Image (cartoon, rainbow, N blue to C red):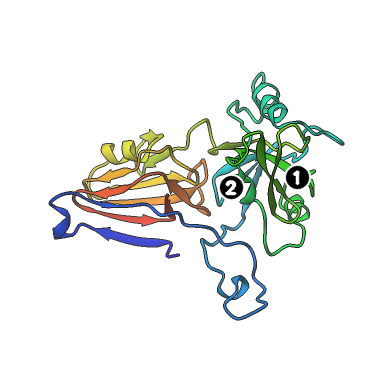
């Protein structure tokens, strides 16, 4: 994936406005050893991982690749602590989000199955051990509940074993581990700002609308709320920043369609989905 692309308005896009449908830019798996020509380790396709991949902040860890924040403790229930699927949902909603919340946030939830899978490193024999060496603690080589129900039998839900990345569905009455997650790195919503100003926004469209030709917009390494982006001026959009906008080591995700009505947009470290 190119980290920098320039999108220029074309004459054909004047009538009607042109739309670029977003596509999911999947990350690399982490596998770098090749076992056969043309395999994953040989080609290493996907979005490159930022370095560092994870940033520890108190009792929480932010994944600089996805923008997701996880509790540092991968086993908040302690030894032998397992819950049913509904119990896991209730535990996050009531205990993890109680009082001032965890790490000052009260918008924690049970991750979906794709979010859980994003933590698996295909280049490691045991992703739990790898994660514990990346700043997490007590990550279990065991099954974790996702919030995703199995559509083929709605009394079952998807689970992921962090040890080897195995995915399966199991009855919601069974007992498994819980690992809370939240989106964004600061506050309940990600932030973008117009460089050189004191203007901050929780949507990329809001930042665009307040900018003028030639401005640069910087955005946090997080997933911005759905809505897409309609461009009508010439701007630069740089994604992947930390919450202080002091460093850039990740990707910003735009949910929706990027529509260019006029002008041009130069982007860096942006994923459209």
- Residue at image x 61%, y 44%? 113
Label number found at residue 125: none
Residue that carries the numbered disc 2 in the rendered image: 114
Locate the N terminus by quadrant.
bottom left
Please state if 77 lies on the left or on the right of 221 as rendered: right
Q: Is residue 69 visible?
A: yes
Residue pushed farthest top?
99
Disc on the earlier residue, 1 or 2: 2
SS category of the residue bearing label 1: strand
Label number found at residue 143: 1
Does the residue at mark 1 contact the one at mark 2 (Cβ under 8 Å)? Answer: no
Of residue 229 and residue 152, the one placed in the foreground of this image is: 152
Identify whether 31 is placed above or below 247: below
- Residue at image x 20%, y 48%? 261
Identify the image quadrant of residue 105. top right
Please state if 50 lies on the left or on the right of 214 as rendered: right
- Residue at image x 38%, y 40%? 193
Identify the image quadrant of residue 94. top right
Q: Is residue 71 visible?
A: no
Identify whether 204 is placed above or below 101: below
Q: Position of residue 185 (x, y in %)?
A: 55, 39
């Amino acid at each position: 994936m190119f980290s920098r692309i320039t999108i220029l308005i074309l004459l054909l896009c004047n009538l009607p406005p042109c739309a670029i449908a977003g596509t999911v830019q999947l990350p690399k798996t982490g596998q770098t050893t090749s076992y056969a020509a043309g395999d994953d380790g040989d080609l290493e396709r996907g979005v490159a991982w930022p370095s560092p991949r994870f940033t520890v902040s108190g009792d929480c860890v932010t994944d600089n690749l996805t923008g997701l924040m996880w509790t540092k403790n991968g086993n908040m229930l302690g030894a032998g602590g397992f819950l049913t699927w509904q119990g896991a949902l209730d535990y996050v909603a009531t205990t993890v989000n109680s009082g001032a919340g965890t790490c000052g946030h009260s918008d924690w939830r049970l991750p979906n199955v794709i979010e859980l899978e994003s933590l698996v490193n295909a280049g490691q024999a045991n992703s739990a051990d790898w994660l514990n060496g990346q700043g997490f603690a007590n990550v279990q080589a065991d099954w974790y509940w996702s919030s995703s129900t199995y559509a083929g039998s709605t009394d079952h839900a998807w689970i992921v074993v962090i040890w080897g990345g195995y995915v399966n569905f199991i009855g919601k009455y069974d007992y498994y581990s819980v690992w809370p997650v939240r989106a964004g790195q600061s506050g309940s919503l990600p932030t973008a700002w117009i460089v050189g100003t004191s203007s901050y926004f929780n949507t990329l469209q809001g930042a665009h609308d307040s900018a003028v030709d030639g401005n640069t917009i910087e955005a946090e390494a997080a997933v911005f709320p759905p809505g897409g982006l309609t461009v009508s001026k010439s701007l630069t959009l740089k994604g992947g920043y930390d919450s202080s906008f002091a460093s850039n080591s990740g990707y910003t995700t735009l949910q929706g369609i990027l529509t260019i009505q006029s002008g041009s947009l130069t982007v860096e470290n942006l994923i459209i989905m």
